Image (cartoon, grey):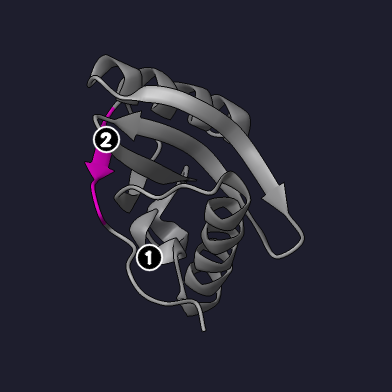
Amino acid sequence: MLRPGVTGQAAEDRAAHYLTGQGLTLVARNVRRPWGELDLVAREGDTLVLVEVRKRSHRGFGGSAESIDSGKRKRLLRAAEGYLQESRWQGPVRFDVVLLDGDDTIEWLPDAIQGDPS
């Protein structure tokens, strides 16, 4: 069970374990770029899956999904664009979100972030 104070790294560990249990293959973690970070990079078949992990211990500040505002979305898309250029990935790509809101429930939202960062 995730408790208040559990680090973001623990949430990412939990999300990675969950996604691999769902059949995805983990490719990279914490891909940092000057303009943003990709928490997890995975493969599902021939699709590259970029994953943002969001954890909130208390809903008083809004749920995990609400924490992805337009600025965060833009940073994620820029980081994704940079990663895709550097990796020279040519196949299909999607951007998923894994939400952890302080209990044992994980919510996986495939293809949750879309758009052009420009």
Dot 2: few (<14), some (14–19), or many (≥20) neighbours within 10 Å? Answer: few
Report the side of 104 relative to 42 (left or right). left
Residue 43: x percent and y percent? 35, 31
Q: Can you identify the residue that label 2 sits on?
A: 46
- Say whether residue 51 is magenta: no
Which residues fall within the magenta stretch? 105-111
Numbered disc 1: secondary structure: helix
Instruction: Note whether 10 is above or below 39 in the view shown.
Output: above
Q: Nearer the viewer, mark 1 or mark 2?
A: 2
For residue 15, which numbered disc appears in the image?
none
Instruction: Note whether 26 is above or below 63 in the view shown.
Output: above
* Residue closest to the eye, 45 or 32: 45
Q: Amino acid at mark 2?
A: Asp
Report the side of 110 relative to 27 (left or right). left
Q: Residue furthest bottom?
A: 118
Q: CA distance from mark 1 to mark 2?
A: 30 Å
Residue 115: x percent and y percent? 36, 74
Q: Quadrant of residue 33?
A: bottom right
Numbered disc 2: secondary structure: loop
* Residue closest to the eye, 74 or 27: 27
Q: Can you identify the residue that label 1 sits on?
A: 66
Decide which of tag 1 and tag 2 comes sooner along the chain. 2
Please give the count of numbered marks on the rendered protein: 2
Q: Amino acid at mark 1?
A: Glu
Name the residue rendered at 33%, 18% in the picture: 20
Kindly check if marks 1 and 2 are in contact, taking CB atoms under 8 A apart as contact: no
- Say whether residue 109 is magenta: yes
Q: Quadrant of residue 44?
A: top left
